[in-house]
Amino acid sequence: MSLIRPILMYGCEISNMFKINKSVQQTENKFLDNIIGWEQEKLQLMFCKSILGLNSRTTNIAVLGELGIYPIFIKAATQMMKFYIRCKEKSDSLIYEAFEDASSREDSEWLKCVKFLFKYVNWDENQDMISPQSFECILQEKYRDHWKQKLNNDERRHNGGNKMRTYRKFKLIYEMERYITVITDFKNRQALTRLRVSNHNLGIEKGRHSGIPVEQRLCNRCDILDDELHFLTTCEVNHEIRSLFFEKVHLQVPQTKTLGNEDLMIYLLTNENEELIKELGKYVYASFKMRDS
Ligand SMILES: [Zn+2]
C-alpha cells in the first residue's frame, strides 16, 4: 500500500478530493457507501484484489477486511485536518493569508469540506483542537461500524441474500488476517482467500450468478448444499486429501476431534497456528484443483 497510497493521496490536503456535497451528506452510512465509488477508492480496491489474486466481482468489504485496510478517504481526510491545523497556527505565513482568504469566502469548497469533516466526527470549533490521531481513530471506528453493518445486512433478499453469510461467521475483527503473511506460496494463499471471501466456483456461488434458489445449489457429487462448509468438511470429491489434512489437524490440536463441522470450519479459518495455516492453504488449493479437474 505504501507504493500506491502517496500517488492516490497526492495533494489531498487542498484538492477537495472527497467531493463532499449535498448528495453525500444525507446520512453517515450513505456517505460511507458513496466514498467507495470515488476514483481513489476504486483504484485502491483494484490494487488489493490484484495482490490477493481475486477477480473484480469480489465483495469490497471482504477485500478490505482480509487486509485490514481502510478506505483512502480516512488517511486523506486526516492529512487535510493536519493542514487545516497548521494553517491556523502559522499566523505569520503566506499560507495563513491564503487560509484567511478562503475562510472569508462562503463558497470555498475546501472550507466546506473541512467543516463537514469536523461535523462528521462531532467536533465543534469551541472545543480544544482535536488531534489528527484522534480524528483518524474516530473515522476508523466509524468505518468499522459501517463495515460490520454491511457484513450483517440481509436486506437484499433476492439471489439468496448477503453472499457474506459464511464470511461473517468467522470474520469478527477488522484487521489483516494472519494467513496473508504466513502463507508465502501465492497459489495456496489465493485459494484460501477465494474460499474465505466466496470468490469461487462452488455451487452456492455459481447458483447465485444464475439465479438458482439457495436450497437448489447442490454439489454434483453429494447432492447436498454445495457451500464452503460442505467443501471444507464433508464433500466426497476431496475426501482423501481431507482425511490426511484432518489427521495433521487432530495431531496438532487434539481438541478439534470433538468439534462439529461448523465449529471446526470456524476454528480452521480463525486459528493462528502457523503450521496449521500453511497446511490449510495447501489443502484448500488441492481441493479446488480436484473440483476443477
Ligand atoms: Zn460434495
Image (tube, grey):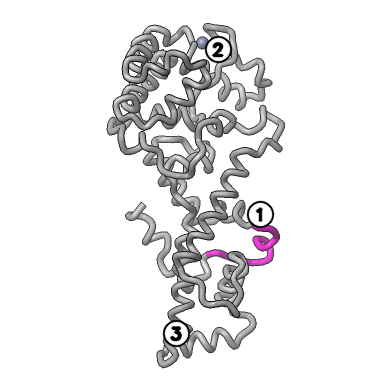
Residue that mark 1 sits on: 30
N-terminal of the two: label 3 or label 2? Answer: 3
Q: Position of residue 158 (x, y in %)?
A: 71, 31
In the rendered structure, which amino acid carries the disc numbered 3?
Glu
N-terminal of the two: label 1 or label 3? Answer: 1
Give the residue at x 59% y 39%.
Answer: 151
- In the picture, the quarter occupied by the C terminus is top left
Q: Is residue 116 above or below residue 282?
A: below
Q: Along the horizontal axis of the image, is 159 left or right of 291?
A: right
Q: Nearer the viewer, mark 1 or mark 3?
A: 3
User: Outermost residue, bottom direction?
Assistant: 92
Circle 1: element type: helix
Mark seen at residue 89: 3
Q: Position of residue 245 (x, y in %)?
A: 35, 15
Residue segment shown in magenta: 18-30
In the rendered structure, which amino acid carries the disc numbered 2?
Cys
